[in-house]
Amino acid sequence: MTYPNWFARIGISDAEARARVQETFNTIFFDPEEKFYHDVDADSGCMEDTGNIDARTEGMSYGMMMAVQMDRQDLFDKLWCFAKRYMHHETGKYEGYFAWSVQLDGTHNAEGPAPDGEEYFAMALFMAAARWGDGKGIYNYTAQGQDILRHCVHQHEMVEGGDPMWDGQNHFIKFVPETPYSDPSYHLPHFYELFALKADEGDRPFWKAAAQASREYLVFSAHPETGMSPEYAEYDGTPRLMFGKPYAYYSDAYRVVMNIALNHLWFGGSKELAAIATRLQNFFHGIAEADYAAYDLDGTAHDEPAMHPVAITAVLGAASIASESPYADEYLRNFWNTPMRKGKRRYYDNCLYFFCLLMLAGEYKLYI
C-alpha cells in the first residue's frame, strides 16, 4: 500500500510534511504550555480533554493511535495502562467496557461507556501488535483487542444485564449500548475491515458485514446537497437532536468526512462516499473559519458559532483525499497554513488536526 503526500499538490515536500507531523505530535505530548498528555504514575499517563478537565476514552484511544503511528511504544503502554487501571470495568453490567469519563487521577465521572472509545482502543491494540509484537498480561495487545470486541458484540450473552455496542441485526454501532440509535461519526468501516481479520474467528463475518453496513449508513445519513452529517441519528439516518441542541451539524459530526478520507486512503472508498466530501467542500467554500457556525443539515446557519473551528478546517483539508471538488487544493493550502489551536478548547481541535495532518502527509499507515 502506498501513502502519498497529498500536500505535494500544493508544493510541500515530503520532508516538510513529515517535519510538521513530528512538530504537531511533540506539541500534543511534550510542549510545556500546549500539551494535553500527562504522566500520572510511573507507568501510566492520560490525555486531558482541556475543555472539560477530564480523561475520556475518546482521547485515550486517540492518544494510543497517535503513539502507534509515531512508533512510541512507551507512550502507548502508559496510556493503555491508565485505561486498564482506572477506566476498565471488572464487574457489573459494564464488565469489559471502559468508563467514558474519569478525572485526571482516575476517579470516575461516569460509569457508562462510549463505543467510539472501544473501537479505537481495539484498532490501536491490533496495530500495536503488528508493529511491535505482543507482550504479556495487559500488553498482549492482540488478546486485549479481541476481548474488547468480544464484549462489544456479545455483552448481552456474557454479562447479566449487559447490552452490546453494535446492533446485531443491522450491524450499526450504537451511540451508547442501551440506545437504539447511532452517531455517524462512530462509523469506521476501515477499522471493521481489520476487525474482520483480527477478531475472534466466529465474529469475523459480523465485522465484514459491519464494514459494508457502515459505508451505506454514512451515505444515507448525509445530506444529499451539503454533504453534512448529523451528530446523532436514528438507524434510518434521520437526525436526532439531543442535549438541547437545535442544530444537527456540530462537533461530533466533523469527524465523518475525516473518517471517509481515511477509508478512501486505505480501501479505495466509493463514488458515493467521495460525493459527500465533494459536497461538503463545495458548501464551505467562501466561508471564513471565523464564521463557521452550527448548522442544520441543509446548511442553514444558527446563531451559534462552531465550538471547534480549527477541527472543521482540518477535516475539510483531509476531505481532499476523497473529494472531486474544484476547491480541493485550496482546502489543502488552507489547512497547511492554519496553526494548531491554543487555549482551553485545544484538545478536540488538535486531535482532529493531528489525524488529518497525518493522513495528508502520507504517514497514517495501516499496520496489519
Image (tube, grey):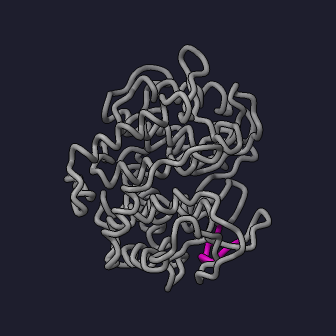
Q: Foreground residue, 215 or 196? A: 215
Identify which residue is drawn at 65% across, 78% down.
301
**Residue 65 appears in the picture as rendered:** yes
Q: Quadrant of residue 169?
A: bottom right
Q: Position of residue 195 (x, y in %)?
A: 41, 49
Q: Quadrant of residue 86?
A: top right
Q: Foreground residue, 158 or 357? A: 357
Q: Quadrant of residue 320?
A: bottom left
Question: Can residue 233 be found in the magenta stretch?
Answer: yes
Considering only vertical position in the picture, is 21 above or below 308?
A: above
Q: Foreground residue, 224 or 136? A: 224
**Residue 97 appears in the picture as rendered:** no
Q: Number of labelled discs? A: 0
For the record, the magenta segment spans 232-240
Q: Which secondary structure type mostly characterizes the magenta part of the structure? A: loop
Residue at the far right: name it. 244
Considering only vertical position in the picture, is 256 above or below 224?
A: above
Q: Position of residue 47 (x, y in %)?
A: 57, 35
Q: Quadrant of the C terminus?
A: top left
In this image, 234 relative to 13: left or right? right
In this image, 188 relative to 12: left or right? right
Identify which residue is drawn at 51% across, 24% down.
78
Considering only vertical position in the picture, is 4 above or below 220?
A: above
Q: Foreground residue, 288 or 211? A: 288
Question: Can residue 219 be found in the magenta stretch?
Answer: no
Q: Position of residue 26 (x, y in %)?
A: 42, 33
Q: Position of residue 286 (x, y in %)?
A: 47, 77
In this image, 163 relative to 29: left or right? right
Identify which residue is drawn at 53% across, 27% down.
32
